[in-house]
Structure formats: structure tokens, C-alpha cells
Amino acid sequence: MSISGSSHNLIASVSLLDEQQTIDRIFTHIDEGTTDLGDTVWREPVENYHSQERFDAEIALLRRRPVPFCPSAGLSEIGSYIARKAAGTPLVAVRGRDGKVRAFINACRHRGMQVASGSGCSRAFVCPYHAWTYDLEGKLKAIRGPEAFPEVNICLLYTSDADDE
Ligand code: FES
């Protein structure tokens, strides 16, 4: 694998192993207690840790490609969830009542408060700010003090679905 470090070509020319090669390589490392090492000692320029341009390019790259979020075994039960950021975006993945795993932006529709943190198992997500409540499929189920939101139609707020198993 080679990665160019120039400012015009921050991330390029990465030769990737295919899936089987990757699996074989990982198992070989596990069996032999080894890891990948470069041919030479890599010295990362300190300025790369301060470069907004580099950071933006890396985030843009991560957002263009699918990235592993969590193992499905981590969401083994109905209501199991994992909330964390992916490429700077707070997400929550949860196994719904139908057994499907869905991922949502972890933000309340009211004022954007995160409705889940860490991991666990829940029957619903209750926003810690004003207690708007969402089901495991991301549907807004209840608004505390609905008289304060006369123009909010709960049925119209439901726009899911990126159903993935
Ligand atoms: S921000 Fe979630 S209920 Fe207000």
C-alpha cells in the first residue's frame, strides 16, 4: 500500500487486497502473532496533524465510501443499539422489532439533541431534552406537551427507511 502525501494528492494510489487476500492475511497474522510493518520507519510530518485541508480531505473520503460501523453481533436483540460518531456524524444503529437493523442520524427532530448514547438495549429512545420519544424504527411516537406544537403532525415526520439487515 502506498499513500501520497503531497497537498494536491493527499490520498491516492492505494493498492488494495481483495477480500480473500485480506482474510488470509488477517488469519496469518493471528496465527503467527504478527502485524503489518512498513519497509522503513514512517515519520508522519507534524503539520499533517494540524492541516485543515488534510482533515477535510480525509473526512470527504470517509463519507464517500461505506465504512464498518459495528458488528451485527453487537445488535443481537430487538432494541439493541450502538450510538457513536462515524466520519464526524453522530449515528445510532438499532435492531428493530422486525429484526432489521437500521441506522439513523442520532439527532432529535426537535432541536437536534442526541437521543441515544453508548450502547444498550431499549424499547424506545426518549430525547433527554424535552422527552420526544422515538420507536426502534425511528418513528416519532410521542411529544410531551403536544399542545405547544399545534402544527407538528407526528405522522408526517416519519420519513424512514434505509432498511438494511
Ligand atoms: S431536542 Fe429533543 S425533545 Fe427537544
Image (cartoon, rainbow, N blue to C red):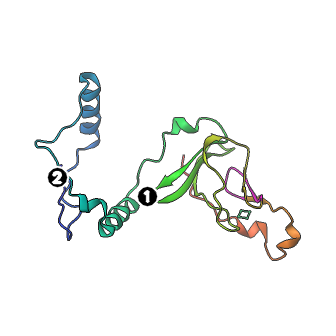
Residue drawn 56% across the image and 57% down it: 162
Q: Report which residue position mark 2 lands on.
A: 2
Tell me if residue 134 is in the magenta stretch. Answer: yes
Q: In the image, 19: left or right of 101?
A: left
- Residue projecting furthest to the top: 31
Residue drawn at the location 27% of the way across and 38% of the way down: 22
The numbered disc on residue 87 is 1
Q: At which x and y percent is residue 105? A: 57, 59
Please name whichever residue, 157 or 57, is drawn nearer the observer in this view of the structure. 57
Q: Position of residue 145 (x, y in %)?
A: 87, 65
Our reading of the magenta stretch's main secondary structure is: loop
**Separation of residues labelled 1 and 2 (CA atoms):** 22 Å
Give coordinates of residue 16: x percent, y percent: 22, 48
Amino acid beneath label 1: Ala
Q: Is mark 1 within 8 Å of ligand 1?
A: no
Q: Is 17 within the magenta?
A: no
Secondary structure beneath disc 2?
A: loop
Tell me which corner region of the image, top left, top right, bottom left or bottom right, holds residue 147. bottom right
Q: Which residues are magenta?
A: 131-139
The residue type indicated by label 2 comes to Ser
Residue occupying image coordinates x 69% and y 44%: 97
Q: Is residue 78 left or right of residue 86?
A: right
Q: Quadrant of ligand 1?
A: bottom right
